[in-house]
Structures are given as structure tokens and as C-alpha cells.
Image (cartoon, rainbow, N blue to C red):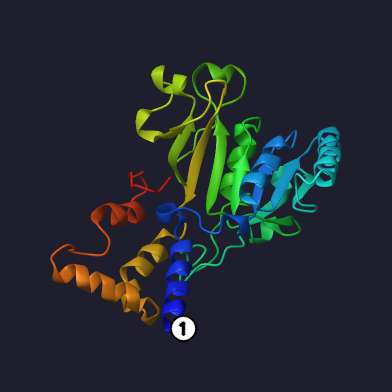
Amino acid sequence: KQWYQRRVAITAGISGFPELFGHRNIKDKIFTFVGAGFPLTGVILHIETGAPINLIDYDREVVETAKKFLELTDKLGVTRPGSIKVMLADARDLIYLPTSKLPGKIRRHDGPTCSPHCPMNQGMSGKRIIPTDILDLASALSPETTSQVININASLVPTIRKRNVRGMSELLYERYDLKEGTNFRLAGEVTPPQKVISGATPAHLVTGFNSTCNVNSCQLLLNTCNFGSKLDFLENILDNPEYEALREAVEEIEEIGGCDSLWDSRVIDFYNKRSFVSISGVV
């Protein structure tokens, strides 16, 4: 029983650091796709993960078509009834808040009071709350709408995946550039290979490739608003009784001279600095 409790504690700790260890229990996360259009992406995402999906679009005709399509997939057993919700709304009229619990004393944001961009401020009162652990933003969203959603409406969401364009694809959609001063950091990008060959996508950002038929990339944006308390948690994790098993393992490695510290300088720099530092397994 004690061994099981330790394992649960370590698993809970890892789940609070998707930027280091990847997302755990993905089926328990809630995905929200803004600018969803035809719901094929949402259906595929649900099939692959088993997770509930929110699809948002402000085009009434598109929303009605999506609902009819989902009625068909539900009847055929392709999707679980009620697992994919389609909403008619402007993305800027909604608040996106995470549902995932955080371990220890990690906060949603490190400030002693609510950040000026926090969705719970008075200026955002009366807006509908959409539970969201991972937010997907379509290429078709304007840079202005994207900026407001990222910096205000979804400022506490831990992970955002932004579909974006580079090079000649900018003839089809407006490109969005993440500005300084935001809570988010561009951590990596999955891109069509031709964008790397042409030099449109910086090579140091590439974490994977999608089909050459794609015109857009998928950028991973990580929320840094609670990185201070996350670093504090990591640095003091061995003092927590719940992580006794981890402390014992580290002590054994130290005895044979294989470990100077639990976290190397790359991890510490990642949480201390605004600029992206490549860490294996981050994206």
C-alpha cells in the first residue's frame, strides 16, 4: 500500500509538468478547437485520444452542418455520444480555464494578485466559461482575435496549439507572430518539410514534420505564468515526504557518483528564462 501511494504521488507530480514529461492521462483532458469549421479534426482527435472535445465557430451554417455530421458519427458508433460539443460563439466572448489539478503548491499564476490579463478579472465577467486543458487555434483566425484569445481569454490555459502559416502560405491566411510580454513561449513547431527547405520555418523550432500537402504548421505555445512556482516545486521535491521513493533513488545514484543534482542547468534555465531552451521530451 505504501509503495502504491508513493507511485500515485510521483505520477501526480509528473502530470503537473507536461512541458517536461509530456501530457499524461490524455483521455481525461479537455480539448477546445476555436475556428473548428467542419468537425473532422475534432472527430479524429476524439478517436485517437478518447478525450472530450469542444468545437467553437461563429458561423451558424457551419455549426449546424457540424452538428448533423456528429449526429451521424454518434449513430454509427464512431464517436461517443455527447463527447464532442459544438458551440456557436465568438472566441472573444468566452473564457477558457483549465480543469487539470496541479500538484503541491504550484499555482495557476505566480502573481500575488490576479494578473491584468487573468480571465477572472471584472472586465471578463458575464462571459461563458469553457473548460479547456489544451486549446487549438485555427489558421483562419485573424491575428487580432488570436492575440486577444491567447493573452486575455485563455491566459491560464497551460498548452496552446496554434495553426500558423509561413512563406507562400501567407497568401492564404494571415500569419500570427507571438509578441513579447505574453505569458506564452513558442516551444516548437510541426511543419511541412518544404517550409524548412525554403528557410521559411527556423530549423531550431522544428520538432516534427506533417504532410507536404499541408499549407500550415502547428506551433506549440507553453504557458509560463506559473514557471516560478513550478521551479520551486522541482527544487524542493526531495524534501516532500510523498516523494521519499524518489529521494532514495537519487541518493543511490549519488553514492555511485552518477548524479550531481536532480535537475541539470537546462531544466533550471528553461523555467528561469523567457527564451526557448531545448530539452528532450518538452515538445
Residue 104 in sight here: no
Assess disc 1: are there few (<14), some (14-19) or many (≥20) residues with their C-alpha within 10 Å of its C-alpha. few
Out of 43 and 20, give the one closest to the viewer: 43
When asked about the image quadrant of residue 62, the answer is: top right
Q: Position of residue 23 (x, y in %)?
A: 50, 54
Residue 93 in sight here: yes
SS at circle 1: loop
Instruction: Please indicate whether residue 58 sits to the left or right of residue 140 in the image.
Output: right
Above or below — where is 260 with respect to 76?
A: below
Out of 202 and 149, give the one closest to the viewer: 202
Instruction: Please indicate whether residue 56 sits to the left or right of residue 224 in the image.
Output: right
Query: Where the C terminus falls, by quadrant?
Result: top left
Q: Position of residue 274 (x, y in %)?
A: 37, 48
Residue on which disc 1 sits:
1
- Residue at 37% x, 76% y: name it: 243
- Residue at 63% x, 35% y: name it: 138
Above or below — where is 60 with respect to 169?
A: below
When asked about the image quadrant of residue 63, the answer is: top right
Instruction: Please indicate whether residue 216 sits to the left or right of residue 59 in the image.
Output: left
The kind of residue tagged 1 is Lys
Out of 6 and 108, give the one closest to the viewer: 6
Above or below — where is 3 with respect to 126?
A: below
Instruction: Please indicate whether residue 129 sits to the left or right of residue 103 in the image.
Output: right
- Residue at 80% x, 35% y: name it: 59
